[in-house]
Image (cartoon, rainbow, N blue to C red):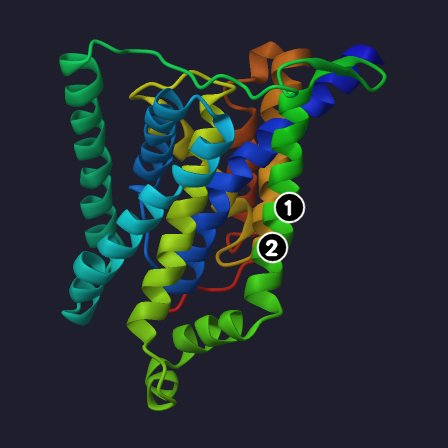
Amino acid sequence: MTFFLFNLLNGLQLSMLIFLMAIGLTVIFGLMDILNLAHGAFYMAGAYFGYVVFQATGSFWIALAIAPLLPLVLGFLLQYFVLQPLIDRGRSAHLDMALLTFGLLFFTIGLIDLVFFETLGLTFMSIDKPAGLGSYVNIGTFYPSYRLFIIAVGLLVALIVWLLLERTVVGAVVRAGVDDREMVRAMGVNVYVVFASVFALGCGLAGLAGVIAGAELSINITMGVQILIPTLVVVVLGGLGSVKGCFFGSLIVGMTETLSQAYVPALALFATYLILAAMLVFRPQGFFGRTPKSV
């Protein structure tokens, strides 16, 4: 029972970390129809900038507050000055966006490698856990308090994003802008700024995930690619543009990966992909998805 509870919590912790990555990609792809394969780059940017801020201040909390701002700003600039002009010129096909953003991902990897490894000689780094979150708590089994913190952050972000998109004027404007951009523009709303802000929010959440992961996992140049694959699986399982679908998709991926490694190691490498294949065959739009509309 203790072993099961420990792995169940590990699965929930991994699910929430993946959710922090996937929710941004879900919103960007589902509502704006932009396949942003550079999402892993913003995750890396958050982790590495978080490490820099932590080294400068010695505070995990300052790093957590400041580091996501870099990917947030970079995401806004990317969407407003690069992606949106391409969309306006009719170059919004998924292949065009995928090639461009995938190239940006590897450009970021190369740039980080040049700065941190080639110049500074740093390979694997981490951010120290804050005081009070580096211990274990007894909840039927001794469990790392920092992993419980990750679970709490994931649940809080899920609630905030859902409320923002489903229960506020901002969310209504975003959805209306996707369905009828000209109508929203006629109402005096700058649709470009709205879309760039949504894109920036998704990138900022990826950066937040990077900082949090930097204190639990190692910070390295492959982390952006490693997290991108399960993130894409979550987006497909949950359905485009659905916060609820992203949440449940993250639970499926996180729990499947963790419990399969614990109980059936031989299935661990492909158990998630079996579920993905079944979803693509029987429900290709995902659990709660909507058919994307070209921008």
Kind of element beneath mark 2: helix
At horizontal 22% and vertical 18% (from top left) the residue drawn is 116
Kind of element beneath mark 1: helix
Residue 48's tag is none
Residue furthest to the bottom: 186
Question: Residue 17: which quarter of the image?
Answer: top right
Position above or below: 50 against 124: below
Contact? badges 1 and 2 (CB < 8 Å)? yes
Of residues 146 and 16, the one nearer the viewer is: 146
Q: Amino acid at mark 2?
A: Ile
Q: Is residue 66 visible?
A: yes
Q: CA distance from mark 1 to mark 2?
A: 6 Å
Quarter containing the N terminus: top right
At horizontal 37% and vertical 45% (from top left) the residue drawn is 69
Quarter containing the C terminus: bottom left
Across and down, in percent, residue 176 comes to 45, 78
Residue 156's tag is 1
Residue matched to label 2: 160
Position above or below: 291 against 213: below
Q: Amino acid at mark 1?
A: Leu
Question: Residue 242: which quarter of the image?
Answer: bottom right
Across and down, in percent, residue 140 comes to 85, 16
Describe residue 282's horizontal placement relative to residue 141 as left or right.
left
Position above or below: 256 against 275: above
Within 10 Å of disc 2 (Cα), the crowding (few <14, some 14-19, many 20+) is few
